[in-house]
Amino acid sequence: MTCPSQRRVLLEWVEQACKSGAGLQRACAVIGISVRTLRRWHAPQALQGDRRRADLRTPFTPTNKLTEAEQQAIMQVINSNEFKDISPSQIVPRLADSGRYLASESTLYRLMRQAGQLTHRGLSRKPVKRNSPLPLVAKQPNEVFSWDITYLSTTVSGSYFYLYLFVDIYSRKIVGWQVYDRECSSFAADLLHDICERLNIPAGQLTVHSDNGAPMKGQTLLATMQRLGVSPSRSRPAVSNDNPYSESLFRTLKYHPMMPVKPFDDIQMARQWVAGMVDWYNNTHRHSGIRFVTPQQRHDGMDAALLQKRISVYTAARQANPSRWSGSIRNWSPITQVHLNPAKPHYQEN
């Protein structure tokens, strides 16, 4: 709120600006007021100070406020052996069942908050806040892998085969897979060791992201990763969005028409099917996330030339029939970076 002396100064500034050729609305916008406010300030009473009436109401004094003795008595009940490990939402109905009323549930919460006792109550483990995994960026193949395990149904009810699958998030290529009859950290360690040797990945280059399953946290796999110079990265528990590439890949494979209708009779049949699916996925499937080139083309660095050829084809088609094009050609530019769990941008107010 501006005082009368400030209003007089601002009125003089606006008057001088208008005499110099400035518009009234523009001058008011510069000093941050509206034209209506300026006109109200021209009234004589506007320069006489604050003419608002004082609040003549008497402050309200609550008559139902708990006394200090009543508050202490309630806290003694809350911290008693009977109620020390349960919340007020459980205390209030139990007191009512025994024919007692001390205060409302919200009052119990308020008193506990004032006493600094509105924390975890009970013998169970306190909830742990899980932070999002660190954002990862892949600018070339063999920098960031994502891996997971999925079930493959068998003819025996309640029994499954387990597909271990590693995918390069930059190229979307399946770089390694295997089907086993159980989940085991040593199986994943052997598969990762074979991938690093086959692709000749140097130590310190690769980061492998996974969820928090038991095989992913097994000591055998962690020791192998440390020996190979591979950095681990994990999702939050029960958050599938933290590992989107593996989840999306499993859905693509399992919903493909080549997926058998009947369960697998033995593990060799399962491995044979996975081998065919991996070959189709890497060499035939045009992936929408990498401008519809195959993962193998992307992994081998052939995507840039293919996309440039598409740009030439579309440019020539547009030049041949310009009336059929209402805008620019389709975006065939190569994707240079792939992000895993990117950090959300923070907008700073000016």
Image (tube, grey):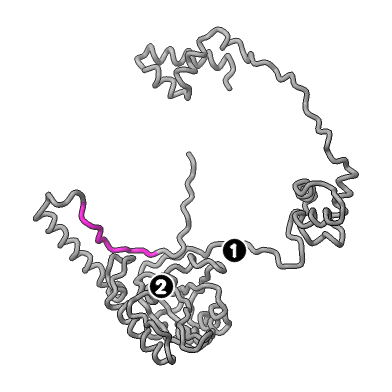
Query: Which residue type carries mark 2?
Result: Arg
Residue 309 to residue 37: above or below: below
Other residues around mark 2 within 10 Å, as few (<14) / some (14–19) / many (≥20): few
Question: Residue 209, how many percent across, how many down?
Answer: 48, 72
What SS does tag 2 mark? helix
Residue at (31% x, 82% y) in the render = 279
Residue at (48% x, 39% y) in the render = 350
Residue at (38% x, 11% y) in the render = 19
Please give the residue where the numbered disc 1 appears in the rendered image.
130
- Asked if residue 142 can be seen in this view, the reply is no
Question: Residue 266, how many percent across, how many down?
Answer: 43, 92
Instruction: Indicate yes or no whether the magenta region holds residue 102.
Output: no
- Asked if residue 168 can be seen in this view, the reply is yes
Q: Which residues are magenta?
A: 328-338
Residue at (45% x, 78% y) in the render = 203
Of the two numbered discs 2 and 1 in the rendering, the one whose residue sits closer to the viewer:
2
Query: Which residue type carries mark 1?
Result: Arg
Residue 171 to residue 85: above or below: below
Please give the residue where the numbered disc 2 appears in the rendered image.
251
Question: Residue 93, how many percent across, how many down?
Answer: 79, 55
Residue 260 position by quadrant: bottom left
**Furthest residue toward left:** 320
Real-space CA distance between mark 2 and mark 1, rounded to the nearest whole angstrom: 26 Å
Residue 161 to residue 306: above or below: below
Direction from residue 109 to residue 229 in the image, left or right? left
Closest to the observer: 195 or 92?
92
